[in-house]
Amino acid sequence: MKRLLTAAALLLLILAAGSCAKTTADSSNSAYDKVLASWVRVNYGKDVMPNDSGVYVLNFLQGSGKAVGDSSYVCAHYVRRDLSGNIKSTNYIDLCKQLGTFSEADYYGSDIWRVGFQSLPTGLEPIIRTMRVGGKATVAIPLAQSLVTNSGYNAFPSSETDNVIYEVEIDDVIDDIYEVQERQLKEFSAKYYGAMDTIAEGFYYKLVSETPGCDSIADESSVNVWYIGRRLDGTVFDTNIKDTAKKYRIYDASGSYEAMSVTYYTDLASFISNSSNIQGFTRALALMKYGDRAETFFNSNYGYGEGGSSTRIAEYAPLFFSIYIEPKE
């Protein structure tokens, strides 16, 4: 197999040759551009040329399914590499297992990216816009074109420190992600809750059990809360119950497995504004009393929104929680 000339080696050669160059941002970007050009020439041949933005499309299959629109939500799998071939991030489950980064709690479905809102790297988005479902592309992006104006997606850091390679596969194209979530939640409700209706748009709540004689919770009281957080596919991504964490193989010896202390407010707006928890979780607590057990599921507007959370909760993900408030002492 042909040995790749690493980015570090190329950069040293170029900087040595151009040691009299001005130490400005432009000259720095120029050096990285030269590194990328040399890397492409060595590994892909001199006939592969950059586009007007300095981006190299190394492999491209447009796909034959639905086209990406001007404001589409693009469902994709990806690999992000440096020029030495090291994988910096990916959502392919098999690669994560090979790399030893697999976690039972992590999400390995498609990432969901919205085009047209400056939330993708400036060098990558124009390529994605030309693709269709089933399409695949490998794109080499110079450092200056890796900028993400509105960072929020796990796949795209707010800033890169080097040139980057993206391998992207388009799994689906969605016009309205909130319509999709509404359908998912309705199907979940029909399957597990007898088609229970929402109590607010995109928000479902069910009181599972209550302790007879327990009081309502007074304003600004401190309550102890136990919870299990799941994605709609049933995967447990978080809990403060030790045995549950061990059962679902997400136990962290350095984690805290004790009741979460929450300051309760009788006014919902005050409760939401003063809470460090996501809105859907807080809205459910606001409906509960001491000793209550409840279950709630809701769309991403009540959860972690368009950016998701770490590697466990995807972009635009609806969530499910089982919640228990301890009885009053």
Image: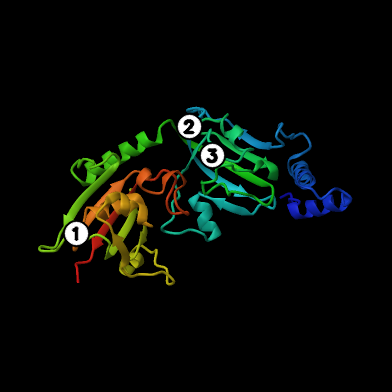
Measured along the vertical axis of the image, is residue 131 above or below residue 191?
A: above
**Residue located beneath label 1 in the image:** 289
Looking at numbered disc 3 in the image, what kind of residue is underneath it?
Answer: Glu
* Residue 137 image position (x, y, % from top left): 60, 37
Tag 1 near tag 3, CB within 8 Å: no
Which residue is depicted at the point 73% across and 50% down?
4
| Dot 3 crowding, Cα within 10 Å, few <14, some 14–19, many 20+ | many
Which residue is depicted at the point 73% across and 40% down?
44
| Dot label at residue 72 | 2
- Work out whether mark 1 precedes mark 2 in sequence or the reverse, and give the earlier one: 2
Which residue is depicted at the point 47% across and 28% down?
66
* Residue 322 image position (x, y, % from top left): 27, 56
Tag nearer the camera, 2 or 3: 2
- Work out whether mark 2 precedes mark 3 in sequence or the reverse, and give the earlier one: 2
Assign a secondary structure to mark 3. Answer: strand
**Residue located beneath label 3 in the image:** 169
Quarter-wise, where is residue 151 in the image? top right
Relative depth, front residue between 13 and 181 = 181
* Mark 2 vs mark 3, CA separation in Å: 15 Å
| Dot 2 crowding, Cα within 10 Å, few <14, some 14–19, many 20+ | many
Q: In the image, is 182 to the left or to the right of 37?
A: left
Tag 2 near tag 3, CB within 8 Å: no
Looking at numbered disc 2 in the image, what kind of residue is underneath it?
Answer: Ser
Colour theme: rainbow
Can residue 281 be seen? no
Assign a secondary structure to mark 2. Answer: loop
Q: In the image, is 214 to the left or to the right of 321?
A: left
Looking at numbered disc 1 in the image, what kind of residue is underneath it?
Answer: Lys
Assign a secondary structure to mark 1. Answer: loop
Relative depth, front residue between 268 and 283 = 268
Can residue 212 be seen? yes
